[in-house]
Amino acid sequence: MTQSAISHQIRMLEDQLGQPLFNRLHRNAVLTDAGRDLEITTRDCFERLELGLKRLEQYRKPNQVIVYTRPDFATHWLIPRLPRLKAAHPEIDIWLFSNEQTFEPVRGEIHLAILPANNDLQGLECRHLFPDLLTPLCAPALAPINSVADLLQRPLLHDERREDWPRWLTAAGSPETATVRGYNFGDSGALVAAARQGIGVALGSLVLAGDDLHAGQLLAPLRTAIPAADWVVAMTAGALAKPKIQLFLDWLNQEASLTRADLAPWAQDAAPPHAIREP
């Protein structure tokens, strides 16, 4: 299209909307506030359209399983285990969505989702995978930490749930309250990664930190743990009926059983939910 044709189309759009989208200067045009707002909306629409077109690829790959989960769970739990899935079921192709897009499984774009159980999962078939527990985690460089007093001498790392440290301290029988000083993280995976780097002590997920604990990159110096939301796998009834989904679920449960075994000693000693003072 020529420049004049584009200008004509913009004029027609402005007439239709009843407001200018550009401030026209001598040799330039600058978006108005309304124009910037419309640009954001249009960009979002095009990105959704591009994503929808990419999803059409699933119809050309009959053995593809489309999985949605949070970025932290994908990075710290699911992705490290995918080589074992490939060895057990080389015919299954995983398409992993781990962005922060809105999860809408009933539209059929995603076969199943692995999420904390406190998400809105009404109308879906859910299977329990394992509980999750929060406990102080630190790099070996910050050891030894043998008591709450030792812990409070170290920098504490926080996530978005600022009540978690006070909850843990209450469960540990300490009258102390956790300082608000220290780094904050909106992503639980980044919180665990910061603890691994020795930046401070995180009240982190034993599920997300499991591999780092086995590798000795993280330590859990104190045995007190508090419960977090259980992890579940959710899907529609239609997805559950697919043989490829059944294969993936069988493999997922085998992997989950290993995590459940790792968590069992912690779960026995964990502070019961009713003993924890909610904010």
Image (cartoon, rainbow, N blue to C red):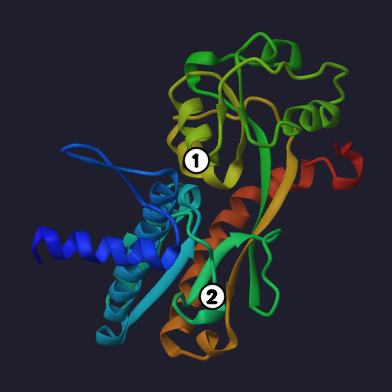
Write the residue at 15% across / 65% down.
5
Q: Is residue 177 left or right of residue 107?
A: right
Residue type for callout 2: Pro
Write the residue at 78% across / 42% down.
270
Q: Quadrant of residue 179?
A: top right
Is 266 placed above or below 97 here? above
For the question of whether residue 85 can be seen, the reply is no
> Where is mark 1, residue-wise?
189
Is 192 placed above or below 99 here? above
Please tell me which residue lies in front, 86 or 205: 205
Q: Position of residue 49 (x, y in %)?
A: 34, 70
SS label for mark 2: helix
- As measured in the structure, the alpha-carbon distance from the residue carrying label 1 to the one carrying label 2 is 24 Å
Please tell me which residue lies in front, 139 or 28: 28
Write the residue at 53% across / 68% down.
113
Q: Quadrant of residue 124?
A: bottom right
Q: Nearer the viewer, mark 1 or mark 2?
A: 2
Quadrant in the picture for the N terminus: bottom left
> Where is mark 2, residue-wise?
105
Q: Is residue 97 left or right of residue 159?
A: left
SS label for mark 1: helix
Q: Position of residue 164 (x, y in %)?
A: 73, 34
| Mark 1: few/some/many CA within 10 Å (<14, 14-19, 20+) | many
Disc assigned to residue 220: none
Mark 1 or 2, nearer chain start: 2
Q: Position of residue 224 (x, y in %)?
A: 75, 32
Write the residue at 30% across / 80% down.
56
Q: Position of residue 201 (x, y in %)?
A: 59, 22
Please tell me which residue lies in front, 104 or 199: 104
Count of numbered marks: 2
Quadrant in the picture for the C terminus: top right
Residue type for callout 1: Gly
